[in-house]
Image: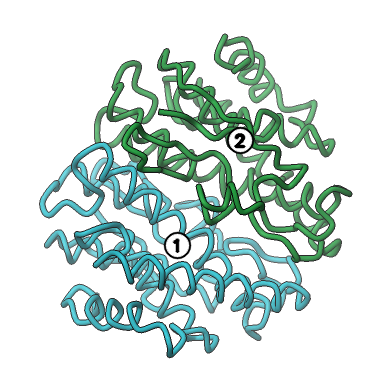
Chain colours: A cyan, B green
C-alpha cells in the first residue's frame, strides 16, 4: 500500500492527520503540485484527474478523493471512530464535514488559486489552462467571512465541529484554517470559541502529520 | 419526520430518488428557490445556509447536506444498499460520487448560476448579493466537457458509475446530467456508453421521484 502525497498541500494533509489519529502508517510518494508534477503523464497514469492524494492498495487498485480514502480506513481500522458510529452521528459529522468543504475549503481555494502567482493559468486544481479570475476573489473573501461566522456559532455550542467528539469534520476544518492563513484568512480575532477549538486541535500530535 | 424539498432543484431530487430506491416515504415541505423562499427568515431558521434539502426528524433535530441525509437513510434502512457494503466498495462509490459532484455538478452549476436571469445576483447557492461572473462560464463549459469525457471512459468499463451495482454515484450523475440539460449540456452524442447508462437509470421508477 502507498499514498501519493504532497507535503505542503491541504488535502493530502487531511489524510495524513486521519491516518495519524488511527495510528496507521502508510509509505508515501511525494508529488510536487507547485512544480506541476501532478499534471505530468507519470502521475496522470496514477490519477487521471491530476489531484492528490491517491491511495494505491497492494493489489494495484487505487482510491482517490480525500474523504473516500478516509472512508476506506474508517472501515478497515474502525478505532478510534472519526466518522461516527450511530446513524445520526454519522450524518451530523458528514454534514459538517461538507459545510467546511463547500463553504470554507472551496472559498479559500478560490482566493488562493486566483491570486497565487504559481497558479495564474491553473485556477482549477488538477487542470491547466484555466486563467485566474481576479473578479472571483472579493466574493470568495466574503464567503470565507460568512464561513468563519458560521463556524464560530457552531463552536460556541459544540466542543468539536462535528459534535461532542473529535472527527473528520475537525480535520477538514483545521486544514481549511491553516490553508486560509496562506492568504491572510485565518480565524478572525474576535472568534473566541473558534480560537479555543483551533488551539485544541492544533495541539494534537496528529496535527504535525 | 419531514423533508424540506424544492421539486425543480437538482439536489433535493437526489434525496427523493435515494428515498424512492429505498422504498421510504417522507412528507415533503416545498420551498421555492427561484422565488427566493430559501433566503427568507422562515427557512433560514430551518437551515441557516439557505440550502435545500433539509431533513427534520421527529424530535426536531435537523440534518442538512444531500449526501449526509442519504447517509442517515443508508444507515437506518440498509436495503438496498446504495453506498456500498465492503470497505473497498464504499470507498469506490464515495470516490465516484465526489468526482461527479466536484467535476460535473459544480461546473454545471457555474454555467447555470452565471447565465440564468433569475440568479444575476445569486451566483452562489444559498447566498444573495454575489453578482454573476460571465467570465466563469467558458471555463465551466470546458470543465463539463472534460467531466463527460471522464464519465464516458468510466461507463465504457463499468456498468454503473460507482461500480457493478446501482448506487448513489448514479443518482448524483443522473441529476447532474438532467441539470446540465437546462443549459444545453447533456451527454454529448458520441458518448455511447454514457447514453446507454443514461437510458438505463432514467428508466428506473425512482427517476420520476
Is B73 positioned to the left or the right of B45 in the image?
left
- Label 1, secondary structure: give it: helix
Residue A86 spot, x, y in % from top left: 20, 39
Q: Which residue is mark 2?
A: B151
The label nearer to you, 1 versus 2, is 1
Q: Mark 1, chain letter?
A: A
Residue A138 spot, x, y in % from top left: 70, 78
Q: Quadrant of residue A160?
A: bottom left
Q: Is residue A25 above or below residue B40?
A: below
Q: Quadrant of residue A156?
A: bottom left
Residue A17 spot, x, y in % from top left: 25, 67
Residue A167 spot, x, y in % from top left: 25, 59
Q: Which mark is residue A44?
A: none
Q: Is residue A21 above or below residue B49?
A: below
Give the quadrant of the C terminus of chain A: bottom left
Q: CA distance from mark 1 to mark 2?
A: 27 Å
Viewer-closest of B52 and B111 = B52
Give the tally of numbered discs. Answer: 2
Is A116 positioned to the left or the right of A8 in the image?
right
Q: Which mark is residue A100?
A: 1
Q: Mark 2, chain letter?
A: B
**Same chain for the residues at labels 1 and 2, yes or no?**
no
Is A13 positioned to the left or the right of B183 in the image?
left
User: How many residues crowd around disc 2 within 10 Å: few (fewer than 14), some, or many (20 or more)?
Assistant: many
Is B139 positioned to the left or the right of B46 in the image?
right
Viewer-closest of A62 and B127 = B127
Q: Is residue A25 above or below residue B174?
A: below
Amino acid at each position: 500500500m502507498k499514498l501519493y502525497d504532497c507535503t505542503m498541500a491541504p488535502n493530502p494533509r487531511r489524510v495524513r492527520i486521519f491516518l495519524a489519529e488511527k495510528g496507521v502508517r502508510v509509505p508515501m510518494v511525494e508529488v510536487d503540485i507547485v512544480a506541476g508534477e501532478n499534471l505530468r503523464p507519470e502521475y496522470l497514469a496514477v490519477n487521471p484527474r491530476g489531484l492528490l492524494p491517491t491511495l494505491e492498495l497492494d493489489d494495484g487498485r487505487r482510491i482517490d478523493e480525500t474523504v473516500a480514502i478516509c472512508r476506506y480506513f474508517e472501515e478497515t481500522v474502525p478505532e478510534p471512530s472519526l466518522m461516527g458510529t450511530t446513524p445520526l452521528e454519522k450524518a451530523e459529522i458528514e454534514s459538517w464535514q461538507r459545510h467546511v468543504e463547500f463553504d470554507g475549503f472551496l472559498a479559500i481555494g478560490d482566493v488562493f488559486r486566483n491570486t497565487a502567482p504559481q497558479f495564474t493559468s491553473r485556477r482549477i486544481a488538477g487542470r491547466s489552462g484555466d486563467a485566474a479570475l481576479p473578479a472571483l476573489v472579493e466574493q470568495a473573501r466574503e464567503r470565507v467571512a460568512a464561513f468563519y461566522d458560521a463556524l464560530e456559532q457552531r463552536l460556541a455550542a459544540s466542543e468539536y465541529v462535528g459534535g461532542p467528539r473529535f472527527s473528520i469534520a475537525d480535520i477538514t476544518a483545521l486544514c481549511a484554517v491553516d490553508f486560509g492563513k496562506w492568504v491572510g484568512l485565518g480565524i478572525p480575532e474576535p472568534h473566541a470559541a473558534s480560537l479555543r477549538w483551533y488551539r485544541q486541535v492544533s495541539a494534537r500530535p496528529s496535527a504535525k502529520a
